[in-house]
Image: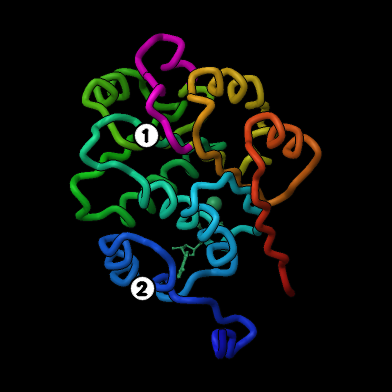
Amino acid sequence: MSNIDTKATSQPAFSTIALKPALLENLATMGYESMTPIQAMSLPAILNGEDVIGQGKTGSGKTAAFGLGLLNKLEVKRFCIQSVVLCPTRELADQVAKEIRTLARGIHNIKVLTLCGGVPMGPQIGSLEHGAHIIVGTPGRIIDHLERGRLALENVTTLILDEADRMLEMGFQPSLDAIMEHIPRERQTLLFSATFPKQIQTIAEQIMFKPVICKVESHH
Ligand code: ADP
Ligand code: MG
């Protein structure tokens, strides 16, 4: 290992990790060359199928870290919901869905569906009937669809909690607990958070298996 860290800030290129060629092509198109520190720290474990806790401030590139993880293992020809991303707000869910769609562009019509509160039920129910590979949404609306039997998560292999600290601050713990009952225990769980209070440690102990902790310190 020589010469990788020529600058204090430099990180390995995406091409150094085991990503599918189609994803590498999309990253190049997006202008993502080298990984951000949280990506470099978390992606090897994520691609290895491990549970990962990622802690890093806003703007550190957490979305692509989990987005590449879930897309790299997605079985695109199996049309069922394989991945669920839980976000605290509709705005964040829309941003995450947009980034995942960009990362997935041109790869066999990967379908990403957002399910958030504050928007009418009718179109969501229609979209659910058409199916999806990946669901991105807020916990309240997702549990609503689950309890009404409109959403089945028995094929989920990757569960992501994005901005977990904010979800707990917003009172989503009961919804999260209820959603867990519908997702197979044998799965990969990725949890991202800007902060790591006791409540997050507790939920991590409950829903994760031997998580790898990837923490990027902020430098000022
Ligand atoms: P976070 O969720 O940690 O707040 P985001 O995932 O929203 O951060 O990413 C912040 C910004 O950085 C976005 O505009 C995203 O497009 C960009 N970005 C992420 N990863 C890379 C990368 N490896 N190279 C270049 N830009 C990136
Ligand atoms: Mg984010």
In the picture, the quarter occupied by the N terminus is: bottom right
Residue 42: x, y in percent? 57, 58
Q: In the rendering, which numbered label is found on residue 31?
A: 2
Task: Write down the residue under mark 1.
Answer: 82
21 or 169, which lies in front?
Answer: 21
Q: CA distance from mark 2 to mark 1?
A: 27 Å
Prevalent SS, magenta region: loop
Secondary element under disc 1, as helix, strand or loop, is loop
Residue 175 visible, this angle: yes
Q: Indicate left or right for 29 with 198 as reference.
A: left
Amino acid type at mark 2? Gly
Residue at image point 58% right, 90% down: 6
Q: Amino acid at mark 1?
A: Gln
SS for callout 2? loop
Q: Residues within 10 Å of mark 2 (few under 14, many from 20)?
A: few
In magenta segment, residue 146: yes
Magenta residues (range): 143-158
Q: In which quadrant of the rendered view does residue 180 lie? A: top right
